[in-house]
Image (cartoon, rainbow, N blue to C red):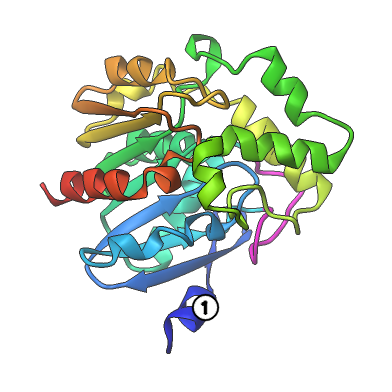
Amino acid sequence: MNADTAQHAHHIARADDGTALAYQRQGAGRPLVLLQGQANNHHWWDPIRADFHTTHATITLDYRGTGNSDRPRVGYSTRQFAEDVIAVLDASGVGQADVYGTSMGGRVAQWVAARHPRRVRRLVLGCTSPGGPHAVERDAAVRRSLAQADPEAGRRALIDLMYSPAWRAGHPGPYPTLGDPGMPPHARHGHLVASNGHDAWDALPLIGAPTLILHGDQDRLTPPDNLPLLAARIPDSRTHLFPGARHAYFEECREEAGRLVTEFLGE
């Protein structure tokens, strides 16, 4: 099977409510679960996924409502997404994995590590927040830019929030982080409700896995002030800020971010 064929090969797990969850496994080595942002499928990871295959077998899933997974009317919360991750681990025969979640995927990863501590060896949280009243939220101007009636204007605003102009000048796209175009409206709304409703503040001290927390210092989508909040609540944690990077630091700072993550997971 060539790399491109493997990239699009899907396996199916069943969630606790019967929802079919498509998941993908590539590479060889210690299992590494990669969790993407809100309203995105596993293609979020396409540009950097292979960077981890020198040491890890990567496991991704299409969240319910995205990709090749079912699109139920119910079950959209970061807690449920975390249970969906456990269903995927069970289906793939993985007892314990490293977990790397970015954006809403970082919120999901918080629940995976807090509620299932024996399943997570090491945890990486990127461009994310604890949610709830303690989180530092994006400002009103950002919310307005994403809620424009013109879809193309909203898309341009999202690209600007994801990537700095200097990086975009040398990387014209396409960009895999702009959402799954095949999502039905009810699923897209469900993802929005899930991300907005996240609040893991009280659960964060239950995370026992060593944790690396990463953020771009120019991130306006999820402000970097959330990084020290997470670090103060997660017992065994360390942090790193990427100067000049926006929300998709993992692409823009690919070499440095990949090295930091790989070294951390290899300890």
SS under mark 1 = loop
Residue at image x 63%, y 59%?
19
**Whole-percent x and y of residue 129?**
46, 24
Q: Is residue 145 above or below residue 113?
A: above
| Viewer-proximal residue among 4 and 217 | 217
Q: Is residue 118 visible?
A: no
Residue at image x 38%, y 72%?
26
* Amino acid identity at mark 1: Ala
* Residue range (magenta): 65-76
**Whole-percent x and y of residue 132?**
54, 16
**Whole-percent x and y of residue 159?**
64, 40
Quarter of the image that includes the N terminus: bottom left
Most frequent secondary structure within the magenta stretch: loop
Residue at image x 80%, y 29%?
147
Q: Is residue 116 magenta?
A: no
Report whether 68 appears left or right of 54: right
